């Protein structure tokens, strides 16, 4: 019976416009977008909280939640106004269900439920990392199978997409994610939050790089580990201070970044070859890193691997990517119930149900 209802809903969707209003509040950006057919951005408005959290050196969950509450209604109104459509034109409401900060997620989920109820529209709980991956579809055509290298604040993962909407995790971080490592190293160098852009800038200014270790783990592993690298950076800083020497911060930043990038690039390209992927997708906030983008571009060109990277505006958290991923569910008629709960540790592999074969 459930399969019949799903198939019926999917058939009905074929005659609709595919206009999805998407809401993203997983961390410290409040974003609302209107996406058509999972590929066309009609609006994508973002309110960043970076300045609010900078004085604390990181995101304060309670403050993030309050800021989402303050602006979410304005963001919805602005997204609708900029899209040129009316609320009655919408086909569904999508929202980030997880992973993320539970309080922040709840703000978006309550707003999405309210809209879905008021407009009598389907609700689609959406996976945040699926959004980062399908941000590429907003600017590129995806070819399957493809490999996604996800590098964001709390995630460093290699995800195989054998076909549309299928996610198979083949590698993940065992400790610090790349974004976390960047922030911790930046904090030890007394650089502002978020640390990634500042480390990237310092590294680009360096004329040399301090030698730092690479964590390759087991020979056949696609997992990542950056806690040892972070400790090595702290050791260099402490030893320099004890000797009374002047720390070459640019050389240290470049050494740290080169260590991170070499491991990411080598494991990603090895995974592409091993699984016969037709494309490599770079996804997540750290995808804005100039050093990583340049290194991946160079290696992929040398090896003939098509590399897809979203523009900078679609790398960081935004609602357009949530709308793109939610379209996968909308096409199938797979909707969430109004008792949808925030899932801070949401499973990517379990988010999409296997496609029903006719």
Image (cartoon, grey):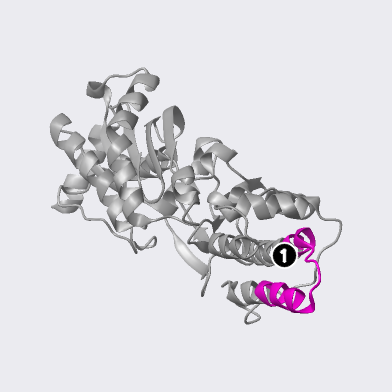
Instruction: Tell which residue pokes out farthest to the front in this image.
Output: 244
Instruction: Tell which residue pokes out farthest to the bottom in this image.
Output: 218
In the image, the segment drawn in magenta is 233-254
The image quarter in which residue 113 lies? top left
| Image spot of residue 116 (x, y percent) | 19, 36
**Residue 244 within the segment the image draws in magenta:** yes
Residue behind mark 1 = 262
Residue at 66% across / 73% down in the picture? 234
At mark 1, the secondary structure is helix
| Image spot of residue 278 (x, y percent) | 61, 52
**Residue 275 within the segment the image draws in magenta:** no
| Image spot of residue 357 (x, y percent) | 31, 53
Q: Nearer the viewer, residue 155 or 233?
A: 233
- Mark 1 neighbour density, 10 Å: few (under 14) some (14–19) many (20 or more): some
Relative vertical location of residue 308 with respect to residue 159 in this rendering, above or below: above
Relative vertical location of residue 217 with respect to residue 134 in this rendering, above or below: below
Asked if residue 140 shows in the view, the reply is no
Q: How many marks?
A: 1
Residue at 36% across / 40% down in the picture? 327
Residue at 63% across / 49% down in the picture? 197
Asked if residue 255 shows in the view, the reply is yes
From the viewer's perspective, tell me whether residue 199 is left or right of residue 14: right
């Amino acid at each position: 019976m459930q399969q019949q209802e799903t198939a019926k809903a999917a058939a009905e969707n074929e005659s609709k416009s595919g206009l999805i209003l998407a809401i993203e509040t997983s961390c410290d950006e409040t974003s609302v977008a209107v996406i058509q057919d999972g590929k066309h951005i009609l609006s994508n408005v973002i309110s960043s909280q970076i300045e609010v959290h900078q004085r604390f050196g990181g995101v304060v969950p309670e403050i993030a939640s309050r800021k989402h509450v303050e602006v979410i209604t304005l963001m919805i109104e602005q997204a609708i106004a900029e899209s040129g459509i009316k609320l009655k034109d919408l086909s569904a409401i999508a929202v980030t269900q997880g992973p993320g900060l539970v309080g922040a997620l709840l703000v978006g989920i309550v707003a999405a439920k309210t809209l879905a109820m008021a407009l009598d529209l389907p609700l689609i709980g959406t996976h945040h990392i699926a959004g980062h991956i399908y941000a590429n579809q907003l600017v590129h055509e995806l070819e399957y199978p493809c490999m996604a290298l996800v590098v964001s604040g709390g995630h460093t993962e290699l995800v195989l997409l054998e076909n549309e909407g299928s996610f198979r995790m083949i590698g993940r971080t065992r400790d610090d994610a790349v974004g976390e490592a960047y922030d911790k190293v930046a904090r030890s160098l007394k650089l502002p939050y978020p640390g990634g852009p500042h480390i990237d800038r310092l590294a680009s200014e360096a004329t040399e790089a301090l030698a730092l270790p690479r964590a390759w783990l087991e020979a056949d592993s696609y997992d990542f580990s950056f806690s040892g690298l972070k400790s090595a950076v702290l050791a260099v800083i402490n030893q320099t201070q004890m000797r009374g020497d002047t720390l070459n911060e640019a050389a240290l930043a470049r050494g740290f970044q080169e260590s991170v990038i070499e491991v990411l690039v080598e494991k990603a390209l090895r995974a592409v070859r091993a699984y016969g992927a037709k494309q490599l997708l770079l996804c997540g906030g750290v995808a804005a890193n100039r050093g990583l983008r340049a290194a991946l571009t160079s290696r992929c060109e040398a090896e003939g691997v098509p590399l897809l990277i979203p523009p900078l505006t679609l790398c960081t958290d935004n609602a357009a990517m949530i709308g793109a991923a939610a379209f996968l569910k909308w096409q199938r008629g797979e909707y969430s119930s109004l008792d949808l709960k925030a899932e801070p540790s949401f499973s990517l592999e379990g988010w999409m149900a296997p496609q029903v074969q006719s």
